[in-house]
Image (tube, grey):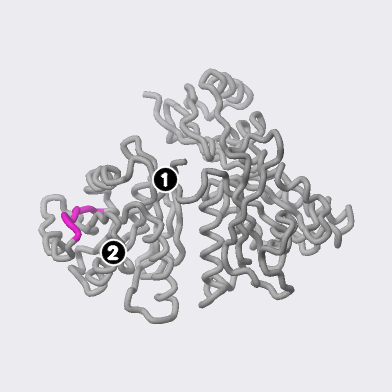
Amino acid sequence: MSRTPVVAIVGAPNVGKSTLVNRILGRRQAVVADRPGTTRDRTYSRAEWAGREFELVDTGGMEPLARGGLGALVTLQARVAVDEADLILHLADARLGVTEADATIARELRGSNKKVVLAVNKLDNPADDSARYEFYSLGEGEPHAISAAHGLGTGDLLDEVVSGLPETAEEEETASPRVAVVGRPNVGKSTLLNRLLGEERSVVSEVAGTTTDAVAAVLEAPPGSEVPGGRFVLLDTAGVNRGARRAEGVPYYSTLKTAEAIRRSDVSLLLVDAVEGLVAEDLRLARQIEESGRSCGVLVNKRDLASPERLREVEDVIGARMTDLRPPIVAVSALDGTGMGDVLPLAARLYEAYNTRISTPEVAGFLNESVGRSAPPKGVRIRYAVQTGTAPPRFAVFANRPQDVPDGYLRYLENSFRERYGLHGVSVRLRLRSSR
């Protein structure tokens, strides 16, 4: 089973990585500032160039010589990105020249045995790119002169990047769909996994954060479900809390593992505590699932400790606060097994919706129906749409003036597709294109 190739952008602090990401994506995805260390965590975005799709990973500034503190943690993040990448885009700053950090990063990248493309940023004068020549000393081939801020040279750079991508990047694991179980510490993730497995596969403790690594297990899919191979690979993840994003050691590393499990999953099941209800950290995880383009279901755990009225209240809050994904909700008790029979059928439904494919005539007809129900702004004409991919479902919508289509109208179309085709909990991706 093939997966989307991964391109990781790495470099020293403040060389313009996030600016380049925004330029490639054509939108303000990453936070950009004139101070080092603005980006701390890895961020993943789906990008496309010359008909090739790839996963673009933005990383924080690498400080390979850092032995502790935030610099070492951010460098750890970047190294994880390097390990999982199919191609590495090393970005340097022409204004600074070749620095010790650049040379150290280049030596480390050579040891990764990955293909590396070198770009020299902040060359804003297209008539003079002579500053790039000294970067040949890094031993990474031709230094490509670019200005991420102004878009100069980025097209040629992306041509080089996509030409170096593998035709297909094969998954190391089985082709069976992957299910990640995510949530705050001590909401019952390991207990849920053990209940599904029927054995003590993970360590369970009353101390928050007992599980620190993703634990893979194989489970039979429900009979009659359209799951490849008839089975799931189940991932359990460590608990995540706000402080762990800034902490050192096991809590911080557990946060990385959770983010990695979400990114590698097809279905992410978010556990919410029925007693405590939906909290800010649950919403942050839901956003992370959506931004990763994964399907999402919500399991309200510990239903044995909550009244029916409390369960309805929690489900109502989830429905009101998670309006983008509109995930399906199942109330369970991992402790006594109540409702657990609905978990794998939920995962199977989410996986099937995640891979939904709709014929072009059907898409065109439904789009016309949706536009007839609620017209776009005056002067804007939505011409037609086609499905361009699955996992998650992706559509290209053609309009005469795509730049004038408001975000709110695009969300209306997304939710219309979600309601008609049962894509609840699935991140529907619409891309506007010019019909001219």
Amino acid at pointer 1: Glu
Q: Residue at x 39, y 70 (%)?
A: 75
Mark 1 — residue? 170
166 lies above or below 309:
above
Residue 61 percent coordinates (x, y): 36, 68
- Rounded to the nearest angstrom, the CA distance separating label 2 from label 1 is 22 Å
Magenta segment boundaries in residue numbering: 140-147
Residue 427 percent coordinates (x, y): 57, 42
In depth, the one of 311 and 323 nearer the eye is 311
In depth, the one of 336 and 141 nearer the eye is 336
Quarter residue 49 falls in: top left
Q: Does the stretch in magenta take in 187? A: no
Asked which secondary structure carries label 2, the reply is helix
Tell me the number on the disc at residue 109. 2
Q: Residue at x 49, y 29 (%)?
A: 387
Label 2 neighbourhood size at 10 Å, few (<14), some (14-19), many (20+)?
many
